[in-house]
Structure formats: structure tokens, C-alpha cells
Amino acid sequence: MQKQETLAQLICRTVLEFEQRQAKVAQDKLREYTSESAIIDTSNQTISKQKSA
């Protein structure tokens, strides 16, 4: 038989889950931004090479 969690435990668990989801969203956005920056940087390097050739 499972013991019921107290209101304090429920609140703590809910807040923790929320913070974990927020951290994952922030990580995903950072990863997306980083990959877009890398693509832009690569494009800029290609354009620079073409202009100097």
C-alpha cells in the first residue's frame, strides 16, 4: 500500500518538475541558437573565402 504524500511533498515535487522542464527548455533553446550560430558562421566563412578568391 502506497503512503499518501503530504501537501508539502506534493508542492516540492511539482516545483521540482517545473524547474526541470524549464531547464530543459532553456537547454533546447541554447542548443538551437548554438547550431544556428554555427551555420551562420560557416556561411560567413564561405562568403569570405569566395570574395577573397
Image: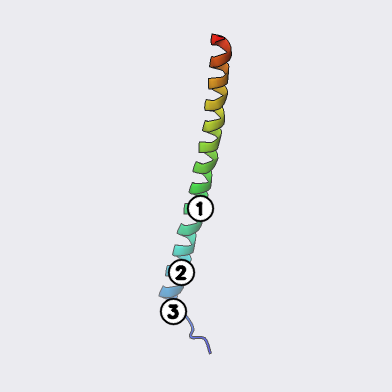
Assess disc 3: are there few (<14), some (14-19) or many (≥20) residues with their C-alpha within 10 Å of its C-alpha: few
Mark sitting on residue 24: 1
Q: Amino acid at mark 3?
A: Thr
Q: Is residue 17 left or right of residue 53?
A: left
Q: How is the image coloured?
A: rainbow
The residue labelled by disc 2 is 13
Q: Is residue 36 above or below residue 17?
A: above
Query: Sequence order check: which comes first, mark 3 or mark 2?
Result: 3
State the residue in front, 10 or 1: 1
Farthest residue to the bottom: give it: 1
Question: How far separated are the C-alphas under marks 1 and 3?
Answer: 27 Å
Quadrant location of the C terminus?
top right
Residue 12 vertical placement versus 2 (above, below)? above
Q: Mark 1 is on which residue type?
A: Lys
**In front: 30, or 48?**
48
User: Tag 3, which secondary structure?
Assistant: loop
In front: label 3 or label 2: 2
Which residue type carries mark 2? Arg
Q: CA distance from mark 3 to mark 2?
A: 11 Å
Residue at numbered disc 3: 6
**Image coordinates for residue 44, horizontal then vertical, percent:** 54, 21
Name the residue rendered at 55%, 26% in the picture: 42
